[in-house]
Amino acid sequence: MSQQLGGQQIVILRQGTQRTRGQEAQNSNIAAAKAVAAAVRSTLGPKGMDKMLIDGMGDITITNDGATILQQMDIEHPAAKMMVEIAKTQDKEVGDGTTSAVVLAGELLKNAENLLEQHIHPTVIAEGYQQAAVKSLEILSGIAVAVKPGDHEMLKKVAETAVSGKGAEAYKDLLCTIVVQAITRVTDPDGTVDIKHVNVQKKVGGAIEDTAMIEGMVIDKERAHPAMPKEIKNARILLLNAALEYKKTEVSAKINITRPEQVQAFLDEDGQMVHDMADKVIKTGANVVFFQKGIDDVAQHYLATAGILAVRRVKKSDMDNLSRATGAAIVSSIDAVTPADLGAAGLVEEKKLSGADMIFVSKCKNPKAVSLIIRGGSEHVVDELERAIHDALMVVSVVVQDKKIVAGGGAPEIELSLQLHRYASTIGGRIQLAIEAFAKALEVIPRTLAANAGLDPIDMIVAIRAEHEAGKKTFGLDVYKGKPVDMLKAGVVEPLRVKTQAISSAAEAAVMILRIDDVIASSKAAGPAGGMPPGGMPPGMGDY
């Protein structure tokens, strides 16, 4: 970047800095975003394909989860990274719809490119897209269907839609039943749900149908001492955020020992201190104790002699879930323990699972935290199963909180497209073209669902649109029958928030990328910033 001043050139950017501007910068950013959308497009829907991703260490991930694919891909282009952020946000907020959000953003930018070629200013397109997004949320709210949190059958259908197309689809009946039971258990009286209270443990071995829910907690730990009991029925549980070890002085201290017997007296005093602490734990009446910190070797012996099953160095998150599952309070000082602080469980036992010892706290009366044990024949199967269950847990929890669903199968997108076209005609001017481009972009979802199922996208779009124009707002594409059907009756439903979040994120990202007309990349020691050639894309990323 330089300026002419009195015939002399003034350079204000460091040597090696790359700069692209105007149409060239926009084309580069749009091409990169479209390439990211193309990379995940084939994974959309129940007939979507999987991707195999191999990292620098040679570790393999096999998945069709959009967020996982984009996080594993080594993307360098700055505009492409913004597309990855859409998937991350979608996954964090609602758990599902990551691929839809990215594909929609790519299509919005593809349609914007056509408008830019007609010399429509980027800010006009951006304004039209923002108006269309706001109108879309309003329309979605109008076509949403109310659901009661106690309608377990509908919640199961929501979970099944999220799991469809993933490796776990053959077992979706079992998995979705478990997911709905888990969310129902951990839902607070005020209707809030936090899926961190569903403790998921992966264990390679067994079959997928061995996946189960435990009415309580499974801790990936073993007994502190082999002499402790392996099984305790009618457990009285104590949770201690304290250590059963020698207390170190908080200030530096020097002890002068002048006679040999003083050494023994000093050691005896330390031993007595630990004995007294162990005695206090025993006197609480607890027969199972979980420590967030360590247990001294001598203390382990005392607790084992008293018939107490103790577990040490338990994670804080597991302690919180144990508290919710058993009703025990987490106590920070042994001296402060009262009988009211103890929790209860029907059974606490140490069991081997795939060669590893684990502590099972089960048969809890009214657990507000539960555990899911995921089983499968290989690590890749278990990992993909975990991703499917995470998506299902998220969507069910969202429906329990929002109490709103919409039909799936591309039905909302076609309805939005039709209504936005009508809305655009009332606006007029160049913004109308942008709103119409937004409306057309929404059709990419049913079009992709059809293409991934081996159906003719144009025929399917025309058929679904005809149903919607006849007032059948919940008709979408049945990829198995190859024709439009009522998605609500078919049980293909999604949370309203999945759609609203996807449309909002895609529109925001598209608008942000459109408004960039100058890319200034600072030089790096290893080469140009982001590895991006001026006006180019990362290697291997093509258009669609």
Image (cartoon, rainbow, N blue to C red):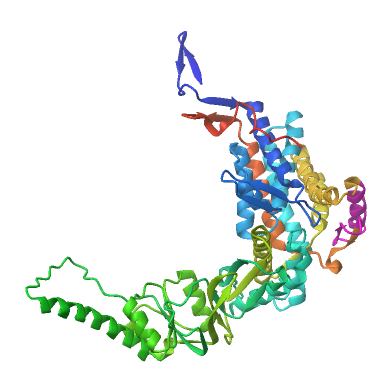
- The image shows residue 77, relative to residue 379, as above or below, that is above
Query: Residue 216: where, in percent of width, then height?
Result: 57, 80
Looking at the image, which residue is at 74% across and 77% down? 151
Looking at the image, which residue is at 69% across and 36% down? 541
Query: Residue 487: where, in percent of width, then height?
Result: 84, 64
- The image shows residue 45, relative to residue 283, as above or below, that is above
Query: Residue 197: where, in percent of width, then height?
Result: 56, 72
Q: Is residue 8 left or right of residue 264?
A: right
User: What segment is highlighted magenta in the picture?
Assistant: 459-483
Q: Nearer the viewer, residue 213 or 229?
A: 229
Residue 474 is inside the magenta segment: yes
- The image shows residue 80, relative to residue 95, as above or below, that is above
Q: Is residue 131 left or right of residue 329?
A: right
Residue 372 is inside the magenta segment: no
Residue farthest to the left, as pictured: 258
Looking at the image, which residue is at 74% across and 60% down? 167
- The image shows residue 168, relative to residue 23, as above or below, that is below
Q: Is residue 471 left or right of residue 172?
A: right
Residue 244 visible in rendering: no
| Residue 94: quarter of image | bottom right
Residue farthest to the top, as pictured: 7
Q: Nearer the viewer, residue 128 or 406?
A: 406
| Residue 287: quarter of image | bottom left
Q: Nearer the viewer, residue 111 or 346?
A: 346
Query: Residue 522: where, in percent of width, then height?
Result: 49, 29
Q: Quadrant of the C terminus?
A: top right
| Residue 409: quarter of image | bottom right
Q: Is residue 370 left or right of residue 399?
A: left
